[in-house]
Amino acid sequence: MTHSEKYQKLAKVFTPASPVEDRSLFAGRLEQLASLWQVLDLRGMHGILYGERGVGKTSLINILKIILEASQTAKDLIVAKHSCYSQDDFEEVWKKIFQEIKIPNRFMVGEDRSQRPAARLDGYTRLSSIIKDDYTYTSREIVRTLSNIRVDKVVIILDEFDRLDSRFDKKLFADVIKNVSDAHQNIKIIIVGVSDDVNSLVGQHESIRRNLKEVNMPLMPPAELREIVLKGLSLLDLRISDENLSTIVELSAGYPYYTHQICYHACYMAIGSDKIFLDDAAIKYSIGQTIQDSKETIRHTFQGATMANQKNFFKEVLYACAICNTDEHGYFQASDLERILSRILGRQAKVQQFARHLTKLSSPERGNVLICYGNSRKKRYKFTDPLMRAYIQMIAYTQGVAP
Ligand SMILES: Nc1ncnc2c1ncn2[C@@H]1O[C@H](COP(=O)(O)OP(=O)(O)O)[C@@H](O)[C@H]1O
Ligand SMILES: [Mg+2]
């Protein structure tokens, strides 16, 4: 392969800016795939896939769509996926879904067959092309239209549901879910977003709670992050030592987004210098680049949180917050930091000495980099932007702060 061919391949294998669209590049997440698959088989059930951004939700549903379409029953199944935009209202969302519903022509019946033949392409017809001009986008009408499609299953996936704002009427949407759950088993809806979406939807119609199965997308476990690195490297004919592999996995802190980012830069350097090994220099370079590539808001918040006109140790406290163990939701307590901070500072650090720092880091004065929950007896902290944890770990790594 020439250099330029290698770079081209690299851009397809490690894609920090875009979700996975190729099954061979998809790692792990079998449990979540199985849960969503199950939803499709359960009568009257729909799914909500939720998790923080950057954990791989869009990638997962891309692969779910590919697997569904390639499955045995695919001939009787339609999958339509739409990514929501903040300005979308209820009507706009359904217009776009109708554009994505491509009905194989053999399933078109009666009057539908004769309509707008120009819209029939490659053996299928878009549902949007057979919708009459005076169509009214009410919950009832939408459910009626969907239930008229004569296939075994229509799976509608709405990604980025959390982007929708008050312009989108959630009550009408909850009505659609209620209706199809009660009467139309062939229609399945999967919503992808954050956990608040579950409550905001159920709040409209308490009775739909039992129709929604929540599937949590947790941070990616280390073994699955390793799989991403190794799969990608084998496609690029590159190798890595166990130690450097562990560094990438550790610094990714559960986010495949960072794994792709670090690997992209490290491979870029290795290809440029005709090496087949991602050596220490490549790893160091890639982490520096990944820090630089981080979102402006993250860099800005970090700077604000750690600024020092006089000698203080906000930076060290923040390092300790990023490195310490947390519960599964990302929370930690002040006492969890004592041991780590003592090591970073090279002297004993007690909670009383840094409690004030945690309070300030959870206030606008230090950019609200942390959020504090609980009362004065038991306070728990968490990073406001979960991606900050990995960002700080990378900075700590470049500055030689041992984990
Ligand atoms: N299972 C996976 N295997 C390999 N790469 C993944 C996987 N899940 C996510 N990624 C990568 O992680 C990044 C974020 O994924 P994405 O699906 O966009 O997350 P989300 O939709 O939760 O924000 C992308 O670069 C994507 O390529
Ligand atoms: Mg996404």
Image: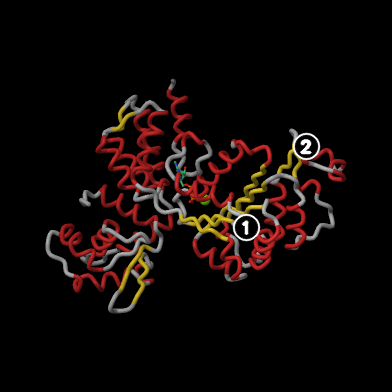
Mark closer to the chain start, 1 or 2? 1
Q: What is the basis of the colouring in this image?
A: secondary structure
Q: Position of residue 190 (x, y in %)?
A: 59, 53
> Camera-side residue: 172 or 335?
172
Q: Is mark 2 within 8 Å of ligand 1?
A: no
Q: Which residue is mark 2?
A: 106
Residue 262 falls in image quadrant = top left
Determine whether the residue tagged by mark 1 lies in a helix, strand or loop: loop
> Camera-side residue: 178 or 122?
178
Q: Position of residue 29 (x, y in %)?
A: 44, 45
Q: Which residue is mark 1?
A: 44
Residue 14 — which label? none
Question: Local crowd at mark 2 within 10 Å, few (<14), some, or many (≥20)?
Answer: few
Residue 379 falls in image quadrant = bottom left
**Image point (32%, 61%), residue name:** 327
Determine whether the residue tagged by mark 2 lies in a helix, strand or loop: helix
Number of marks in picture:
2
Res. 68 in view: yes
